[in-house]
Image: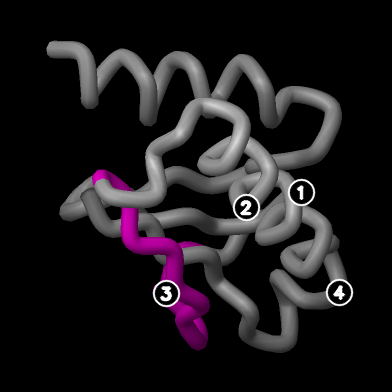
Amino acid sequence: MIIQVCVGSSCHLKGSEEIVELFQKAVETYHLENEITLAGSFCIGKCNRVGVTVQIDEDVYTGVIKETFEEFFKDKVLAKLNA
């Protein structure tokens, strides 16, 4: 699985650095280092007024914020890996 977090200007201002750190911690916590490639990406082209844009394989999600990150990770990453 490839997870790309937008680090372009807009997402940077909305906290992409913090989202990257949350992904890094979650990957370590769930021991997924061999299953997930985590990368930064410049603009994915789906800017949103709130939150950061994240691409997981071919799927693009907008509005990722620290307050809902854990639920997002479980629903979009863990569920997909366990499917």
Residue 24 or residue 74, whichever sits in front: 24
Which amino acid type is marked by label 4? Leu
For label 4, the SS is helix
Horizontal side, residue 21 vs residue 72: left or right? right
The spot of residue 49 in percent (x, y) is 74, 55
The spot of residue 54 in percent (x, y) is 48, 55
Report the disc number at residue 45. Answer: 3
> Which residue in the structure is indicated by mark 4?
13
Pair 2/3: label in front: 2
Location of residue 20 by image quarter: bottom right
For label 2, the SS is helix
Q: Please report the residue visible at 43 percent of the width from the left and 16 percent of the height from the top.
A: 75
Of callouts 3 and 1, the N-terminal one: 3
> Which residue in the structure is indicated by mark 1?
50
Which amino acid type is marked by label 3? Gly
> Which residue in the structure is indicated by mark 2?
24
